[in-house]
Image (cartoon, helix red, strand yellow):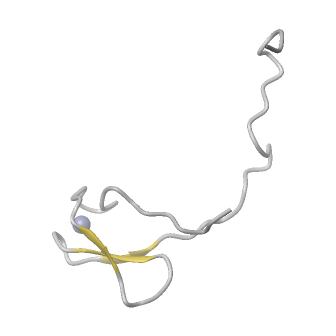
Amino acid sequence: MSERAAPFYCPYCGDEDLRPSEEGHGAWECAACNRAFRLKFLGLLARGLRHDDTGGDEI
Ligand SMILES: [Zn+2]
């Protein structure tokens, strides 16, 4: 699984004018509000990948 994750909107101002930051991997800069932030994949949730038991019959 790739660690790349591109945000569509700035989490602070909601603007779409984002560009990769020179700060490094996963870092982005928002041209609208001049903020820099970093996305980090923390891991899967404890329940793991979604696997419904309530789906009924398999196709
Ligand atoms: Zn912003």
Q: Is residue 50 above or below residue 13?
A: above
What residue is drawn where x is 21% and y is 59%? Answer: 15
Q: Is residue 55 left or right of residue 22?
A: right
What residue is drawn where x is 73% and y is 55%? Answer: 44
Which corner quadrant of the image does residue 7 belong to? bottom left
Q: Is residue 48 above or below residue 12?
A: above
Residue 25: where, in percent of width, then height?
50, 82
Residue 1: where, in percent of width, then height?
68, 62
Residue 47: where, in percent of width, then height?
80, 43
Residue 14: where, in percent of width, then height?
25, 55
User: Farthest front residue?
Assistant: 59
Which of the two residues, 59 or 36, is positioned nearer the viewer here? 59
Q: Is residue 47 left or right of residue 26?
A: right
Which of the two residues, 38 or 24, is positioned nearer the viewer here? 24
Q: Is residue 10 left or right of residue 32?
A: right
Which corner quadrant of the image does residue 42 belong to? bottom right
Q: Quadrant of the C terminus?
A: top right
Q: Is residue 40 above or below residue 50?
A: below
Q: How many marks?
A: 0
What residue is drawn where x is 77% and y is 15%? Answer: 55
What residue is drawn where x is 79% and y is 32%? Answer: 51
Q: Quadrant of ligand 1?
A: bottom left
User: Farthest left residue?
Assistant: 32
Which corner quadrant of the image does residue 50 belong to? top right
Q: Is residue 36 above or below residue 41?
A: below
